[in-house]
Amino acid sequence: MDDELLSLEAELKNLRPAAPSARLAGKVERALAEPAPVAFTPAPAVIVRRPSRAWWLYASALPVAAAVTFLLVVTARRTPPARAEAVAVAEPAAPMFKPVAAENVLYAVRDEGLVTLDDGTAARRERLQYVDTITWRNPRTNASVRWTVPREEVRVVPVKFQ
Amino acid sequence: MEDDATHNDPWKSWFQLYGPKLLLCARQWTRSLADAEDVVQEAFVRFWRHQRDLPGEPMALLITSVRRAALDLARRESRRTAREEFADGGLEDNPPLFQITLEQDDRRDAIEAALRLLPEEQREVLVLKIWGELTFDQIAQQLAIPANTAASRYRYALAALRQALTAADCHG
């Protein structure tokens, strides 16, 4: 920018925006004096969760995770006492595994078309399939455990015809 | 007395500091000063209750909240949904945008008049940069545009302001 624009920019920065009215400050004060409303997130009308057909595939991750955890515990117990003490002094309160990541992957959405609810209103039904993965990590050994589970959501969204 | 009140109510010092800037930003996205005040109220109360302990720049959070409240208001009232369509009313009100000072009132009037004539997309970038004190990256996030576009609009806005002010000077 040239000097003229820079000086104009500086001049603009010197202008102070007009202050809000006393009426606005009063409204803010009254609003803050009221108890905060409970946070509410509108949810879809119906959510049905059920295991996926391939649940056994994902469920097999559980025994694997348990086995890894068991091996890590055994390994930790076999650590020479002197070294264990040194580690304990360095990080006395550190938990063994900490959750470090969580992700939800939406891998399929199926529109199941229009349905009629009990009260007669029309709605659109969608089936969403997720894989949720949570990862824990041991900060001392850098070992990690990952837990993966399938999740299926059925959303029924009211439809308005115009 | 007012100082005591401000000291006792921390929100008041925040509101004194950020309120004027927020109101000016809100006027970019609302149709009247009254709407802009409603939007600032909603955004500030939301920020104070739920967001003031969040990390990051308070002004950026507050402006995000103001913009969201302005969009919500526009949708609620079924006026217009596109930002470009509804962001023209606040500045059409007569109340001045800036504090009135005893000196250089003519110059301030000329700047306000030139500002009101700017294209909306340039004016909102200029306001967010100068008085909202946002970076181009933050403006880009607010407006969902590339940062380079925000920077270009800012330069165009300054150039257009300079041209308008020069013309105003020439015509006395």
Image (cartoon, rainbow, N blue to C red):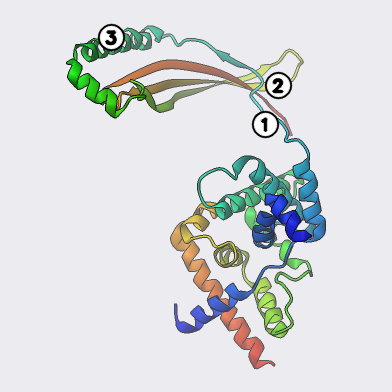
Name the residue tied to disc 1.
Answer: A39
**Residue displayed at 23% across by 10% down:** A74
> Which circle marks residue B59 in the picture?
none
**Residue displayed at 64% across by 17% down:** A46
**Residue displayed at 77% across by 55% down:** A25
Q: Does residue B80 appear anywhere in the picture?
A: no
**Residue displayed at 51% across by 45% down:** B55
Q: Earlier along the polypeptide chain: callout 1 or callout 2?
A: 1
SS class of the residue under badge 3? helix
Image coords of residue A34 (percent x, y): 78, 39
Name the residue tied to disc 3.
Answer: A70
Image-based side of A71 in relation to B106, left or right = left
Where residue B118 sits, quadrant-wise, is bottom right
Where residue B54 sits, quadrant-wise, is top right
Q: Residues within 10 Å of mark 2 (few under 14, many from 20)?
A: some
Q: Nearer the viewer, mark 3 or mark 2?
A: 3
Front one among B148 and A86: A86
Q: Label 3, label 1: how many angstroms apart (C-alpha)?
A: 41 Å
Front one among A85 and B24: A85
Q: Is residue A72 above or below residue B100?
A: above
SS class of the residue under badge 1? loop
Q: Is residue A129 above or below residue A25?
A: above
Name the residue tied to disc 2.
Answer: A122
Image-based side of B43 in relation to A8, left or right = right
Q: Label 1, label 2: how many angstroms apart (C-alpha)?
A: 28 Å
Image coords of residue B148 (percent x, y): 44, 62
Do residues under tags 3 and 2 come within 8 Å of each other at their CB atoms?
no
Image-based side of B18 in relation to A82, left or right = right
